[in-house]
Amino acid sequence: MKYLIPALLLSVGLIFTAFPAFGQESEVKVVDEVVAVVNDGVITLSGVKRETKDQVDSLVKEGKKPEDAQKLVDQKKGELIANLINEELLIQKAKELGLEKDIEASLNARMVQIMKQQNFKTLDQLYEAMRKEGLDPDDIREVWRKQAIRDEVIRREVQSKVYWEPTPTKVKEYYEAHKVKFTKPETVTLSDLFLNFAGQNPDTVKAKAAQLVKQARTGADFAKLITENSDDQDAAKTKGSIGTFPVSEFESQYPQYGKAIKGLKVGDVAEPISDDIGVHILRVDARTAASSESQFDEDAVRRAMLDENFPEALKKYMAKLREDAYIQVNDTYRPIVSPLLSLDERKDAGVKNETQEQAKTKDQKKTKSPKQK
């Protein structure tokens, strides 16, 4: 049977490997513990510990004490394992959809973009600089890869379908019933003069930014300051323009930048804003006032409908993925994971308590076989 080996692995609860032992047949050594089997993939204890550490480190960076961060993450261990099961299902779905090449290409393009922004000539130079900063390029790529897989599968399988599902008639009906949502918002158009920290003393860069702000506020041509000083590779072409944004969305998505431009008039230059890679100097190029008059825009209406319907659609999609999958959770972790899974999954998780022969007989009698690859 396709899932006999994964089921046996979980029944034992451990992954083993054999090594020669001086005249003996072999010596068995424990390598890792299987927390859950997901189709032909496994969630291991080392993977759970790695994810736990990442979450703890993230909370510590946000200012929490290590012991408090560890306690918070430990309290949500069941949720963490359930999320890893969902992630494994999405990764398997991406393989089924043949997304690997596209995702790998997007990762390469992202690295090249960073390489250019940081003024490196080759990716090897970028990777070397990252390692000097204590960052492992392979680890970063893997995090990005998993995120890209999740995003792309959900975009194709859920968001796109929910977006296009309403008929034109339904879209019009929604607009008529929710006109207040489609009034014209206040917008702001911005330019950005970016100074890179790469290879430079951050204090020197910040001092330069302060000088440029002073020049801009005393009449210097901001577009000229950008072309002569910005480290953005496209500065000469774009003159620093980064586009027009609804003010409310800009403030919610980029609170640090939204705070910097709050109250600024057209032509005003914000105080320098520092992030992990450099300093940004924003100028307000234009502002448009909000309007109380409703305006029909099919894309805007569909997006509003998507925002409303997406959470439930995603929930149903993930439930269907789990329903069609073979999921078996180790007895040690089942009590904290099962409550977060559906009734069918709890039943599947309980299969572990059966003997191997019972499980095999049950599998042969199933009218609905596990998902085939």
Image: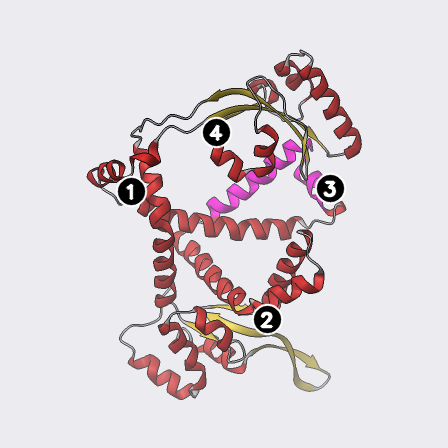
- From the viewer's perspective, is 81 left or right of 114? left
At a point 66% along the width and 23% down the height, the residue shown is 230
Residue 288, picture quadrant: top left
Q: Nearer the viewer, mark 4 or mark 1?
A: 4
Residue that numbered label 1 is attached to: 164
Residue that numbered label 3 is attached to: 129
- From the viewer's perspective, is 147 left or right of 221? left
Residue 94 x %, y %: 43, 54
Q: Nearer the viewer, residue 53 or 13?
A: 53
Q: Nearer the viewer, residue 221 or 87?
A: 221
Q: Quadrant of the C terminus?
A: bottom left
Distance between mark 2 and mark 1 Cα atoms:
41 Å
Distance between mark 4 and mark 3 Cα atoms:
34 Å
Distance between mark 3 and mark 2 Cα atoms:
32 Å
Q: Nearer the viewer, residue 142 or 256?
A: 256
Q: Amino acid at mark 2?
A: Leu
Whether tag 4 and tag 1 are in contact, CB under 8 A, the answer is: no
- From the viewer's perspective, is 126 left or right of 345? right
Q: Earlier in the sequence, mark 4 or mark 3?
A: 3
Residue that numbered label 4 is attached to: 245
Query: Mark 2: which secondary structure?
Result: helix
